[in-house]
Amino acid sequence: MRVDPSGDAPVVVCNLTKTFLDESRGTIHAVDGISFQCRESEVFGLLGANGAGKTTTLRMMSTIITPTSGSARILDHDIVKDPAGVRRSMGFYSASTALYPRLTARETIEFFARINQYPEDKVQARVNSLIERFGITEYAGVRVEKLSTGMKQKVSIARTIAHNPRIVIFDEPTIGLDVLNALEVQKAIHELRSDGRTVIFSTHIMSEAEKLCDRIAIIHRGRILACDTLAGLREATGLHYLEDIFLLYVRGPA
Amino acid sequence: MNWASLKLLFKHEMRMVLRSRRTVVTSLVLPAVLMPGLILGARYVQRQQAIQLDQTTFHYAITGPWADEARRLIERYKTAAEFRNFNLQEEYPANPDQALDDRTLHFYVRTMTVSEADLAAQDDDDTPTLGSQPVERVTGVRGLQVVFRGSQQVARTGAERMVDLMRSVRRHESYSVMTSRGFPSHPDGILALTASNVATDSQISGSNLGRFFTVVLVVWLVAAGSIVAMDIIAGEKERGTLETLITSGAGRTEIAAAKHLAIWTVGLVITFAQVVYALIYIRLNVIQLPDNFEIDLSAQSIAQLFVLFVPLAAAIAAALLIVSAYAKTYKEAQLHFFPFFVGTLVPALAAVLPGLKSRSIISFIPLVNVSVAAREVLTGRPDPLMIAVTAMVTSLTAAALIRYSAKLLTREEIVVSAQHEQAVLEGGEKLFQRRVFQWFTVMWAVTFAAVTNVPLLQSTRAQVLFNEIGIFLLGSILMIWRYRLNPREVLGIRRVRWQVWAAVLMAVPAAQVVAVAFFRIMNTIIPTPTEMLRELGKQVAPSGMPLWQMIFLMAILPAACEELAFRGVLLHGVRHRFHPIVRCLFVGIVFGVFHYTLFRIAPTALLGVILTAIAVMTGSIFPGLLFHAANNSFAIGMDAAGISLNRFDWGTYLAAFGVFFLSMHTIWRYGKGH
């Protein structure tokens, strides 16, 4: 996929590569020269099977791990040269990012707003608005360890956007959730897009991608095989269902 | 450094600590309650036992050819002040052994004829001593034996008191005999003996306290810091909160610094709390100090101790942070904690060694320097310049460790666990590389616990057989089997050129001479007490063992089993982890640590480094095995022949170094890489 590294898209990923050295299997290209860019107010989906490279890509973008080569820019912050700037500009949410059990819901949101350098004089107002928005007023003073899974999910999303980032990354956010909680997460993603934020979202669930994403990148073995809107993918393949489209790209024509 | 972030993170960490019930209870509440409880409990039990023993009437019998005379002596001397509470009731059983079994007797006194006494003395000789030297027992005298059943505590105590009584009888009777045969005075009167101690009570108390002061504080600092440290990274990794934190706007340096500060603060606060508790218990007389105990600490001394221990607490906190960072889970961190704990105790014990002064190279060895300097402060002989040097060295160590811990948080394998989870799933070689440290930690702990606690393993033979076969050989086989390792690769079974074998044999005597030269130089910097060197010699070549047995047990068996374990399995496990030089140092040090005794660790670690270097250069354990066996045999042979390598001049040492260097070069030249 061709990208314009100097363009004004909020997220630009260019030839991003991550290589691991494995004793028995040799060099593994977990991510192999991925390029894409995301626009303002869109939900960009990375769709792939387990081990396709989605999480590694998002972890590089959120500066947890460093790329072997290539670059990525988030709101003019380079992920290698200015990792702190990148982290302050975005929110990262995944199944493995947990909450501090001994903090209350309010303290959690407050802490993440402050640590991401949200203006001090506006922290309380921001925290109150998020508590209200996610409907957790009743539980705001309760320690996270005592909350239900659904409530924790809401607190987790609230802490991700506590500093009001323009870019939000969701790495397989509905994994392990029941239908009701998964719907809550999907609703939150919808709302974030409506607020004008760019959401990057990875999943292996076709229905989720179909429902949420403005554009979908099909990723397999560390490479992006296709990237377009759902309509564009349908037109390019002549297939209607995303599952069929995905299988066509991953396995080739039957 | 973003100070606002650091402040926020530190406050956050402290809030987490204070909200952890486990931390607060185990570090503050339990010690406050447990310590006096244990002390008072132990004192109560001791007092009750003493009362019970004083109220006990011991039933005994007297048998043998001169029972009547023994009876008269007991009657006469049991009224002495020291035996006033020793209540005795003589019984007259037909069969005293049966009475012991039936518990109607606590013990019986068996008088023996001359021949019976000589026979009994062969098994258990009450050899007298003059000064510290044993002297010949007079033969041709009658004997007396106290027979009891040791499995009963009351019987044992009674028998011990009867032995004391009979010793008192022997002493007084011999004095009477001497006086009656014309000795001009009481034998104790031949020399007026007095002792005059010019040290003040404060200096004596300071000297006693100073030896263990650092150890006690280090135990508190490590124990208190570890409660937080284990949770602060390993626990967070396990819960997933570390990933949450590192994706926030906080920098890794600020995160590491805040965590370090939290461990440091908790360590200092809890240590301070322990000191306060101890002072309160002394004040309340729960802890009873020895008579004449007096510590005269001026404000200056307190300030000096403060300067020494605050940077030490920072260094320990940073080291704990690193230990926690390497662990993937809370449980794994606990496993790493024990060797770390022991590792800090050994250098902290430096103050116990006589002759060490801070005005030497000691001041540049972290922890050892604090231990020695603190003793000097407590004995009223502080060296301000060396205290400053010690504080600076400790502060630099702390800074280096903090820097390293911050770098650790940027390493993917430390913060991301996915790769390791894969290893757990796959098992085999990959899992072994992850578990090899744990295996060796457990092996070390088992060896240490067994050798120090199992009476059966107190002899050299039993110890060697247990360690070599039970731990090293079986442990290695178990690891090879459990992780499906390829024995060919582990052992490095490959053809080794004849030049290497020749060089190994040439290197052995040269290495011995070089080692002696090295320790002679070291001895001028850190003097080693002669007593310790003698002990070391005894361990290398124990007396009373035939030469062939010594060669087998101290040379061949250790070479075979230890090379398999250390240069085979351990080296194989870390071969992808470190640079070859670091690998040699690491395996060498681990090898040294398995030799426990303080003064054996350094020489065996040096030998371990050489052996690992040979294994790395040749890709096989067998040349090292030959070196190990030949080296130990050579040392035993020299000892047996009474030849000392200390007598050589420095020219000989230099020549030996040349030969050793040439041998190592040959091994490198004709080893694996060529």
Image (spheres, helix red, strand yellow):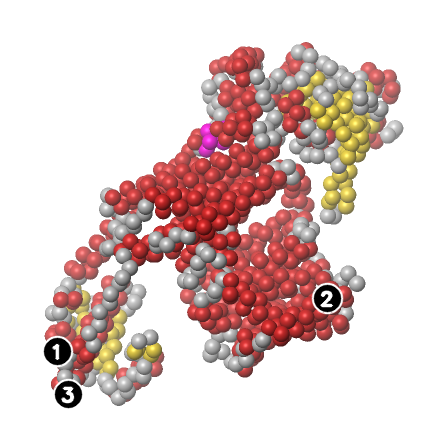
In terms of image quadrants, where is residue B443?
bottom right
Is B135 included in the stretch rendered in magenta? no
Residue B396 pos. (x, y %)? 54, 45
Mark identifier at residue B665:
2
Whole-angstrom CA distance, mark 3 to mark 1, is 22 Å
Q: Nearer the viewer, residue B531 or B200?
A: B200
The magenta segment is B12-17
Could you tell me which quadrant the C terminus of chain B lies in? bottom right
Indicate the amino acid at tag 1.
Arg
- Height in image: B595 above or below A217? below
Residue A41 pos. (x, y %)? 72, 14
Indicate the amino acid at tag 3.
Arg
Q: What residue appears at the point 69 percent right and 68 percent down from the top-left corner?
A: B661
Residue A209 visible:
no
Q: What residue appears at the point 54 percent right and 62 percent down from the top-left corner?
A: B602
Mark identifier at residue B184:
none
Whole-angstrom CA distance, mark 2 to mark 1, is 81 Å
Is B13 included in the stretch rendered in magenta? yes
Q: What residue appears at the point 45 percent right and 70 percent down from the top-left corner?
A: B530
Which element carries disc 2, helix, strand or loop?
A: helix
Does the magenta stretch mainly form a helix, a strand or a loop? helix
- Height in image: A48 above or below B450? above
Q: In the rendered image, which residue does mark 1 sit on?
A: B72
Mark 3 or 1 closer to N-term? 1
Indicate the amino acid at tag 2.
His
Residue B137 visible:
yes
Neighbourhood count class around disc 2 (C-alpha, 10 Å): few under 14, some 14–19, many 20 upward: some
Q: Which numbered disc, 3 or 2, marks the residue closer to the eye?
A: 2
Of all chains, the one bearing label 1 is B
Q: Nearer the viewer, residue B494 or B580?
A: B580
- Height in image: B404 above or below B657? above
Q: Which numbered disc, 3 or 1, marks the residue closer to the eye?
A: 3
